[in-house]
Image (cartoon, rainbow, N blue to C red):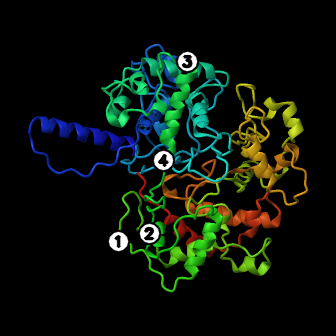
Amino acid sequence: MVWKLRTLKYLLLFSMLFSAACATPLAPVAEEEEADPAEVAIGERLFQETRFAQFFFAHNGSQVNSPLPAGDPVMAITEAVGREFPGPFAGMSMNCAACHMVDQQLQRPEGGMRTYADFARRSPIPAREDGKTTAPRNSPPLVNSALPRTGDLFLHFDGEFVSMEDLVRATFTGRNFGWLPGEQAQATAHLAKVVREDVGQDSIARQFVAIPYRVLLAGTDPSIPPDFRLPEEFRIDVDKASDQQVFDAVAKLVAAYVNNLIFSQNAQGEYNGSPYDKFLTINHLPRKPNDGESDLDYSRRLIQALDNLEEIEFVDPLSKQFEFHQQEFAFGPEELEGMRIFFREPDAIPLGSEKILAGGIGNCIACHAAPNFTDFSFHNTGVTQLEFDKIHGLGAFEALAIPDYATRSADPEAYLPPTAAHPNGTGIFLSVPAADKPGHTDLGLWNVFGNADIPKPQAALRELLCRRLEDPNAPCTVQDLLPLSIGLFKTSGLRDLDHSSPYMHNGQFDSFESVLMHYFQFSARAREGSMRNPPKEFLGMALREEDLLLLLKFLKALNEDYS
């Protein structure tokens, strides 16, 4: 449920109560959406909260309940590719929703719905002394970001975090909220102060329930509506708790909210929002893995079941209309052929010349298996190489000097991003490339793997990379594995892609078409040997340009009206 829908719900509730008290009959109203759990509802308010940022601390920190004299300039507009809109939080300071929007720009002619993403290639961030004006990466959509999975949980494009709570903690104390390395304690204390002193009367609180945080988080006051009464495990007495305990309680609530963001499913956990999902349903095809079945094995079973159908029923575009997409709600012969290409795997790798010329092999499920259309893992798609070479010339990324593990470990601040332990880190390999910054680029997983300042994901990442060694007897040390992490980024899901453009970790592509053309070109470069650290999955792809149009039709059939 997005915040505007929640506001409408409580306005309707108020009008019903008022009318009943006046004995005035009400006209019938639409059936109310089922209320979210209290921890999700309060987590949503904290997600919208604009007072946790460094700008608020610097300009209004002692007056928690007073509006800012002037808002953070970065909040004045919503930046988009080739255009901009008035910011939904203008006059305030940074919050989570500024980079992870839903319907805040829905009414703008060139805006629209978002799956908790923004519109920028790289998200604007508050100005500080380091001179940075944008995040190094595109804001990924949050819907489906924390789905339960059989493997390890990795969050962010580079797998830096192993839980949503860790991610939230780092966001509230990190550069996106205006805080510099070394200011974590200050950020934690400020957030705790806002929570303790809040009186529940600011504009965001009134969109939910105008009750102070201290009362909501204690969870026992009889004035708290049932929809906002926290379960015991989320409650905290903020007056008795330490700053860190208050901070952790807030992170837990925001994590509960984000973890609840899932594309439409039925009671059995089957997706049901897209034309593709309807196609599976009307043809009685399997819609999710069986217990213990991997997504890849499910995808193979699904395509086999499809091949066994004697008759195929297509989705009539007149059966339903999209509300938030400019396309028909349809799944026809072209979408079906695109699906077959998407699911088709090679018989062997590398492919022979005849197979390559024949095309029609997407090998897409190697990384984007149904039903989630992501393997939750990491792959090099060549996007970093493409961006770097566009600036510095063809072949520049292949020739780029990247330190080995021993060199990097001997002087981490020379190569790695800044952390609390190493606040002067250059982040040269987690930065935006530019003509006047030779050597600067984004190596993705390379920045995290083997980084002693980020201990939590290391064991799982090492195991993941070890499994990719072609020789099972090859050494599996961090020193040996680090080159395999160059340019690897986490696989994004493909559902409702229309509402998360621009695409890839750097927002480099504005359309599905350009993404598919990139895969077409870089799979060829992988076969030619001109791609640094190529993924084996690219060697199993054989696509013609006419295949791309069919793949595009299939991908658009994964869109849905998420709200």
Q: Earlier in the sequence, mark 2 or mark 4?
A: 4
Q: CA distance from mark 1 to mark 3?
A: 56 Å
Residue 260: x %, y % from top left: 48, 45
Residue with the mark numbered 1: 319
Residue 551: x %, y % from top left: 58, 70
Q: Residue at x 56, y 48 (%)?
A: 145
Q: Amino acid at mark 4?
A: Leu
Q: Are marks 1 and 3 in contact (CB under 8 Å)?
A: no
Residue with the mark numbered 2: 278
SS class, disc 3: loop
The mark lying in front, picked from 1 and 4, is: 4
| Residue that sits furthest to the bottom in the current view | 310
Q: Amino acid at mark 1?
A: Ser
Residue with the mark numbered 3: 242
Q: Is residue 218 visible?
A: yes
Q: Are marks 2 and 3 in contact (CB under 8 Å)?
A: no
Of the numbered discs in the image, which one, if any, rests on residue 261? 4
The mark lying in front, picked from 2 and 1, is: 2
Q: Residues within 10 Å of mark 3 (few under 14, many from 20)?
A: few
Q: CA distance from mark 2 to mark 4?
A: 21 Å
Q: Earlier in the sequence, mark 2 or mark 3?
A: 3
Q: Earlier in the sequence, mark 4 or mark 3?
A: 3
In the rendered image, the vertical position of residue 403 relative to residue 28, given as above or below: above
